[in-house]
Image (tube, grey):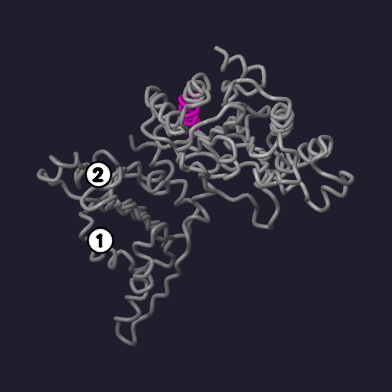
């Protein structure tokens, strides 16, 4: 179990100078109400390096003459385990998770201070600031308490994310397999929702059907709160209420993805509630699909990240002008960015353990990153007409259309992982008719 995590820890330490210490704080369990807790979800940086999925754990990696991996966790407690599940304990941290040493989390501070002797740089990953306020004091402990004629130790503190998040952008074979499984489950979920969608059904019923379907395909949870948005609700980009009844003539936008073994899918489809596109719905849908497909066609190793966004904007701006929804020459439209009134958002993000996965979009010189084999990301153009946009023809108002696919960069170009979710007008109408 620990082999892939050993490799990741070794790869990280190989990038650090000698006499470095990495401190990675795991998450603690959050209270939902009174004595009821939320289902636990580990910090992804912690999980990426350790595979350890229990609350209240801390990992230390030490780069020195002899590298060390030390894990602090909850000790075994039979009474607590009867109520809340088994713990790995100190022995399990070593035997199952590959730690060189392991201690009770209650011993963390007392154990850390001696380990800081001789450490020049601390790399910190602490997303919820469990130790941020204490770390400077710990780093300064030696020079504050040693005698005046003893050499002082000055320790710098740096964010681990600057190095680790770059590692996480390119996915291993094992990671890609998990993304594929998440996409496959989500594909089944989207198809199930598409086949039962109709006027009179509530958004929450469709959201629940998606959850049920991905569970049958091995997902324990959604990767993010599902967006099931009928009509004007789709003009709120992160609509999560999922509480309205769908009406005939509306478009439905569903942005939903399952999580498989901590890896996410993120797929969006938009289609008419009644299963048949009107002329106006068809025109906007096809325009968004054209933008998506032309951007996907640009994907290859070496392509600049921002070229995908620029392609989407160019295609949609030209289409909106042809439909009479934007005025002026195309050069004027692009120069003034008047298309942004209807396109609203960027058109993609990295995908992995986080649905909006970590990693830079620019290199150290400020240039856009170029695509590499093994990168996984979304492309998701959209066009939105709010119901109060009174200068827009009425047939378009209260409609949001976004189409999103999950893309893998391959040696020869790309693979659209989510292509099996109906995406053309004909495919959607056939699926909904069935």
Q: Quadrant of residue 130?
A: bottom left
**Label annotation for residue 108:** 1
Q: Quadrant of residue 250?
A: top right
Q: Residue 98 colored magenta?
A: no
Q: Residue at x 51, y 53 (%)?
A: 163
Residue position marked by numbered label 2 in the rendering: 94
Percent x, y of residue 156: 45, 69
Task: From the viewer's side, name the closer residue of 154 and 27.
Answer: 27
Q: Quadrant of the C terminus?
A: top right
Can residue 64 be seen from the camera position used here?
Answer: no
First in sequence: mark 2 vs mark 1 = 2
Q: Residue at x 13, y 46 (%)?
A: 77
Q: Residue at x 40, y 23 (%)?
A: 217
Percent x, y of residue 416: 61, 27
Residue 348 vs 403, above or below: the answer is below
**Looking at the image, which residue sits at the far bottom?**
148
User: Which residues fall within the magenta stretch?
Assistant: 172-187
Q: Quadrant of residue 293?
A: top right
Q: Is residue 314 left or right of residue 388?
A: right
Residue 62 vs 352, above or below: the answer is below
């Amino acid at each position: 179990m620990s082999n892939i995590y050993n490799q990741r820890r070794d790869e990280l330490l190989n990038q650090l100078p000698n006499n470095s210490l990495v401190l990675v704080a795991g998450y603690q369990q959050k209270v939902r109400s009174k004595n009821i807790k939320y289902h636990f979800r580990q910090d992804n940086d912690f999980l990426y390096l350790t595979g350890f999925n229990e609350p209240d754990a801390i990992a230390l990696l030490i780069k020195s003459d002899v590298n060390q991996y030390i894990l602090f966790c909850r000790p075994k407690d039979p009474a607590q385990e009867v109520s809340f599940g088994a713990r790995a304990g100190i022995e399990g941290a070593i035997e199952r998770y590959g730690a060189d040493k392991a201690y009770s989390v209650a011993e963390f501070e007392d154990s850390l201070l001696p380990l800081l002797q001789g450490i020049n740089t601390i790399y910190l990953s602490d997303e919820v600031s469990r130790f941020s306020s204490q770390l400077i004091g710990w780093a300064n402990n030696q020079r504050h308490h040693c005698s005046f004629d003893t050499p002082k130790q000055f320790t710098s503190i740096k964010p681990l994310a600057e190095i680790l998040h770059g590692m996480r952008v390119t996915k291993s074979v094992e990671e890609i397999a998990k993304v594929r499984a998440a996409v496959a489950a989500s594909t089944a979920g989207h198809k199930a929702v598409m086949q039962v969608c109709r006027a009179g059904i509530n958004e929450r019923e469709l959201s629940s059907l998606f959850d049920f379907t991905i569970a049958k395909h091995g997902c324990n949870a959604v990767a993010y709160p599902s967006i099931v948005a009928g009509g004007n609700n789709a003009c709120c980009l992160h609509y999560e209420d999922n509480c309205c009844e769908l009406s005939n003539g509306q478009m439905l936008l569903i942005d939903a993805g399952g999580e498989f073994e901590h890896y996410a899918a993120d797929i969006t489809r938009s289609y008419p509630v009644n299963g048949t596109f009107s002329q106006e719905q068809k025109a906007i849908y096809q325009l968004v699909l054209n933008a998506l497909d032309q951007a996907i066609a640009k994907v290859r190793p070496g392509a600049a990240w921002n070229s995908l966004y620029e392609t989407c904007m160019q295609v949609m701006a030209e289409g909106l002008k042809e439909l009479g929804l934007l005025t002026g020459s195309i050069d004027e439209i692009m120069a003034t960015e008047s298309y942004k009134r209807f396109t609203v958002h960027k058109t993609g993000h990295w995908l992995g353990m986080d649905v909006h996965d970590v990693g830079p979009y620019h290199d150290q010189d400020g240039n856009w990153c170029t695509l590499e084999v093994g990168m996984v990301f979304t492309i998701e153009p959209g066009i939105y007409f709010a119901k109060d946009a009174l200068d827009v023809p009425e047939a378009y108002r209260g409609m949001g259309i976004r189409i999103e696919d999950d893309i893998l960069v391959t040696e020869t170009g790309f693979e659209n992982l989510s292509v099996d979710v109906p995406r053309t007008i004909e495919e959607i109408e056939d699926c909904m008719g069935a």
